[in-house]
Amino acid sequence: MLWTVPVTLSGSESPGYTTGMKTAVSIPDEIFQKAERFAKRRRCSRSRIFSDALREYLTRHSGDEVTEAVNRACREIGQAQDSFSAAAAYRALVRTEW
């Protein structure tokens, strides 16, 4: 069974009695129950839990967009066979702590 729950996402432009956009999402039972227990332990609303989780997910995955943009730019420019740039890049990478 999936639960459909209203979620309020924060936003300052939205009209109404809440500051956010309301939407409904379907959530599997197991995740819904865990979120419910977590919200009670933290003494906050389910909407807050879901909004925080979505914010964290988007933040965590926004790097993918940056990487894709850089890859797209590199494909458009092509690969230059510049020995100076290659040596400089190598020196920078060697000094970088991974």
Image (cartoon, rainbow, N blue to C red):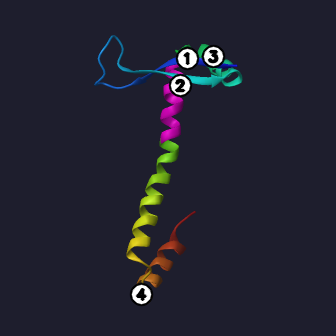
Q: Which residues are magenta?
A: 47-58
Residue 50's mark? Answer: 2
Give the side of residue 71 with respect to residue 29, left or right.
left
First of labels 4, 2 by sequence position: 2
State the separation of the CA atoms marked 4 and 1: 56 Å
For label 4, the SS is loop
What residue sits 42% from the left and 78% below the top?
78
Q: How far across and how far down the image is residue 82, in percent?
A: 42, 87
First of labels 2, 3 by sequence position: 3
Say which residue label 4 marks: 82
* Marks 1 and 2 in Cβ contact (< 8 Å): yes
State the separation of the CA atoms marked 2 and 3: 10 Å
Q: How far across and how far down the image is residue 35, in percent?
A: 63, 21
Would residue 51 be counted in the magenta stretch? yes
- Amino acid found under the numbered disc labelled 1: Val
For label 2, the SS is helix
- Amino acid found under the numbered disc labelled 4: Asp
State the separation of the CA atoms marked 4 and 3: 57 Å
Residue 5's mark? Answer: 1
